[in-house]
Each structure stands twice: as structure tokens, then as C-alpha cells.
Amino acid sequence: MRHALVFGGTGQIGEPVIDRLRHAGWRVTAISRNAQRDEPGVTWLQGAFDAMPLLPAQVDAIISCGPLDAFSHWYARTPIDATRVVAFGSTSVVVKQHSVDPDERDVAQRLQLAEDRLTSAARERHAAITLLRPTLVYGAARDATLSRIARIAHRVRWFPLPRRANGLRQPVHVGDLAGAAVDCITAQAAFDRAFDLPGGETLTYREMVRRVLRVLDPPAHLLELPLPVFEWAVRIAQSRGIATGFGDAAIERMRRDLVFDATPAQEAFGYAPRPFVPKTSMFPRAG
């Protein structure tokens, strides 16, 4: 039986990855900071990159579904034997490279350094590595964009956007990302490559938000404002602890197209993401 070591197994991508591996007949060893209960085919170990438990000396594949930077440092210094490595990064490596926010530029730089570090370490070990870069993730109520929008809308019954928030987006479901991670393990065309993983539909930021607001229980309303008024409203909300994370860089991106090509992933391992059809269960009311 093939054996996979999974990091980030309790995360929004890691959970469906483990499910996919189990159904594909893999034995899974997964790492978590908190104690987890073993399941058929899944053994949980408690630890972290700076306090790792005793791991198997050899596995068939390592899959990282958590922070790429921390994983890359661990992999570079740990002599574990695995012929396949699959690691999730982010399209932020490109999107935030020239951001007006220095913190976002730092994120992009650290992602690029992590990718380079992993590629170099895998090459030294003669392991085949695949880097997966999702776009805007949704589907598990744990993402940093659409779930945040839903939480605000649940609270105030509406959500504001600046006018002409028509930058194109390709939200991608966690289930499609999990499928990509498992499918690419044995696809030789995916070896030693990086792939952007957009969702199966391209739509405007405004339409993306509108669809989320429409499925909330009860539904919320979209309020479009002139940019100066929107920025004022965001500052007021942030002073009340409501709209954290919507800085100048995030507002600027609402009007910018962020579109990626899924063709390389489709050709390499059959990647076929679903269109963006949010459901009420994806955005539960907090508390």
C-alpha cells in the first residue's frame, strides 16, 4: 500500500486531500499541532515543524497543504526519503509581487524563496516535486476572502463595494484542489513543474461577491459606493474591528484582473475545476 505523509491535514485543503488519498487506497500519516483521533487508513502524529515527532524514514509521497515557507525550511534540512513531493503555494507569488503594501510584497518574496528552496532540495535528493498555486480558495468556510465577506455581511446585513469593482476572478473550490494534489502524484507530466490552479469560471469581483451574498441565510445586499465613500466606510468599519484585511492594496485589486491559465494543469493531470456555485452551507453564521 502506498504511504503518504501529509502536512496541514486539518486545514481547509488538507482535510479533503486526506479523504481523497484514503479513497484512492493510500495509507496516510498526518501531522497536526493538536491531538487528533486516528481513523482507518489515517495515523495522526502531534507536532510542528519546530517540534517534529518521530516520522517514517521513508514514504512514497509528501504533501504539504499548509504554509509553504515553513514546509520548505523543514524539507531542506530533513533527510526523509520520498520520491514525490507535492506542495501548495499561492498565486500571490505573482499577484502581490508589486503590491503597494510592503507586507504583501514580503509575502510574495517569501513564497518565491520557498519555491526555490523546495525545488533545489528536491533536485539534490532526486525527488520529483510539483508546486500547486491556487487562486482564490473557497468551499470550507475557512478562507481569508469570501468567508470574511460573508461574516461581515451576516453581521451588518449588507456588504459595500467600490463602483467598478469589475476585476476578473477565478475562485477555486477546495475539493478541486484536493483532487489536483492527488491526481498529480502519479502524473509524470507534472514532475518538477509548478501549476496555477484557477477555478472553472471567470467572473467579476462584483459578481463573485453578489453570488455569495445571495446564498447567505438570510441573504444580504450589495451596496456599491463611490471610491472615496467606500474608503471612508472601510476606515469606520476597521475602527470597530469589522473590516480588517481590506487595506489599500486589497481595494486596488478589486478593479484589477487576476486571471490564470488552467490549461497546463489540464494537460498534465486532467485538472477540471467546477464553476463558481456557492452554497449556503459554505458560509455558516458565526456563533
Image (cartoon, grey):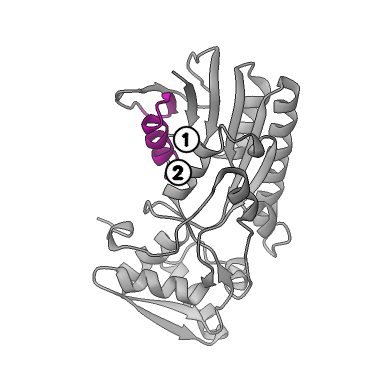
**283 shown above or below 14:** below
Q: Is residue 1 magenta?
A: no
Residue at 45% in and 23% down: 47
For residue 8, the mark is: 1
Instruction: Locate residue 61 relative to residue 264 in the image: left or right.
Output: left
Residue 115: quadrant of the picture: top right
**153 shown above or below 39:** below
Cβ atoms at labels 2 and 1 below 8 Å apart: yes
Quadrant location of the N terminus?
Answer: top left
Residue 193: quadrant of the picture: top right
For residue 158, the mark is: none
The magenta-colored residue range is 12-34
Which sits earlier in the primary sequence, circle 2 or circle 1? 1
Q: Secondary structure at mark 2?
A: loop
Q: Is residue 20 magenta?
A: yes
Q: Amino acid at mark 2?
A: Ile
User: Is 231 or 45 nearer to us in this picture?
Assistant: 45
Residue 15: quadrant of the picture: top left
Say which residue label 2 marks: 13
Percent coordinates x, y for residue 231 in the rendering: 54, 78
